[in-house]
Amino acid sequence: MLPHNKYSTTFDIPSSNATVSISRFNIGNITAQNQFHTLIFPVIPGRDMMELPMYAFLVQHGQRKVMFDLGIRKDPLNFVPSLAAPFASGQFAPSHFDTDIFDLLGQAGIAPSSIESVIWSHAHFDHIGDMSKFPNTTSLVIGSETDVSTYPTNPNATLQESDFAGRNITPIDFSKSSLEINDLRAVDYFGDGSFYLLDTPGHIAGHLTGLARVTANPSTFILLAGDTFHHVGEARPRPALQANFPCPAHIVESSRGHVSTDYFFSPGSSDGQVRSG
């Protein structure tokens, strides 16, 4: 048996007695047809469909309320044309078109006007909702590297003017922060150690995550990770990934007896070779 502390990790999180509460809202699921290749290659035949949940989170700090992500808007045909098209064609299909975060907040008795800020983990359509439904008193918090260009000024933009119109925008510039948590640059959002924003680029420029302290003694946390690790299949060591981040040798060796190299690449293997175990 491995010693208990074999996997213990110190994350260097400053101590605090301040906490927040987190409420999760399931906006619904979205099914994507013939889109798996955008995340994983090669695609296993017959598996080019994925269903993804969409969540929004309410962060409550005393009387202050902040949303972290909003899920998808319920009228996706009103996205910019490049995003509306796959919904019109059926490539993207939400589980329903009649409910969004505003409906769910209403059911919970929470007025949009009580939300002081919305934090986007990143600016993809299944996270940004419809900001135009919030009053202008609700600010928008984004990573400073977020592309804030809008359609049609930028014909390639996926955001639109209504996402920002009349609203206070607060970019989080992690380069100005001296705080680090587990080697990630961090910002203490409320200033009391209850809720941190972490710089986690990679999925898209400006991507950030939220680290919420939900109990104080001892401290426990909930990580609002956005799309930091989007799908387990992204761990597959395909050639480009393997060249830059080699798969640990013991994992490669353990796979040789039962994983087809059609879908798992490793040094010395040949494409299409299936090993029986």
Image (tube, rainbow, N blue to C red):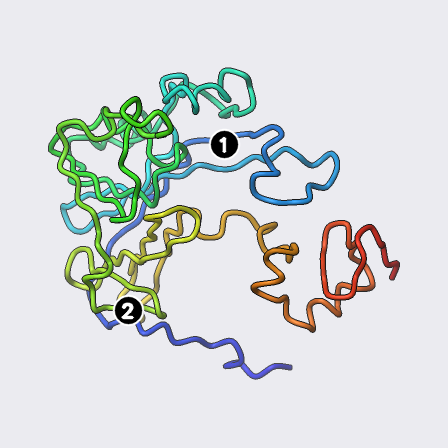
Foreground of the two, 213 or 259: 259
Q: Position of residue 55 (x, y in %)?
A: 40, 39
- Type of amino acid under label 2: Glu
Near mark 2 (Cα within 10 A), the count class, few <14, some 14-19 or many ≥20, is some
Front: mark 2 or 1: 2
Residue found at x 62% / y 30%: 34
- Name the mark on residue 93: none
Residue at left 47%, top 77%?
A: 8
> Residue drawn 32% across and 30% down?
159
Task: Determine which residue is flagged by label 1.
Answer: 29
Image vertical order of residue 115 relative to residue 15, above or below: above
Q: Quadrant of the C terminus?
A: bottom right
Q: Residue at x 36, y 47 (%)?
A: 205
Structural crowding at the residue carrying mark 1, measured as other residues with C-alpha within 10 Å and reported as few (<14), some (14–19) or many (≥20): some
Q: Nearer the viewer, residue 95 or 125?
A: 125
| Image quarter of residue 115 | top left
Q: Quadrant of residue 191?
A: bottom left
Question: Dot 2 corresponds to which residue?
Answer: 180
Q: Residue furthest bottom?
A: 3
Task: Report, in whole angstroms, how far the alpha carbon at label 2 lies from the one at label 1.
Answer: 34 Å
Question: Circle 1 sits in a helix, a strand or a loop, which is it?
Answer: strand
Residue 70, image x and y in percent? 33, 35
| Residue type (three-letter) at the residue carrying disc 1 | Asn
Q: Left or right: where does residue 148 sit relative to residue 225?
A: left
* The one of 56 and 92 positioned closer to us in this rendering: 92
In this view, the residue farthest toward the right is: 276
Task: Pick the quarter of the image with the N terminus.
Answer: bottom right
Question: Going from the N terminus, do you reach mark 2 or mark 1 first?
Answer: 1
Find numbered disc 2 in the image and state the secondary structure of the residue it sits on. strand
Q: Is residue 187 left or right of residue 78?
A: left
Q: Measured along the vertical axis of the image, is residue 25 above or below residue 12?
A: above
Q: Is residue 218 above or below residue 32?
A: below
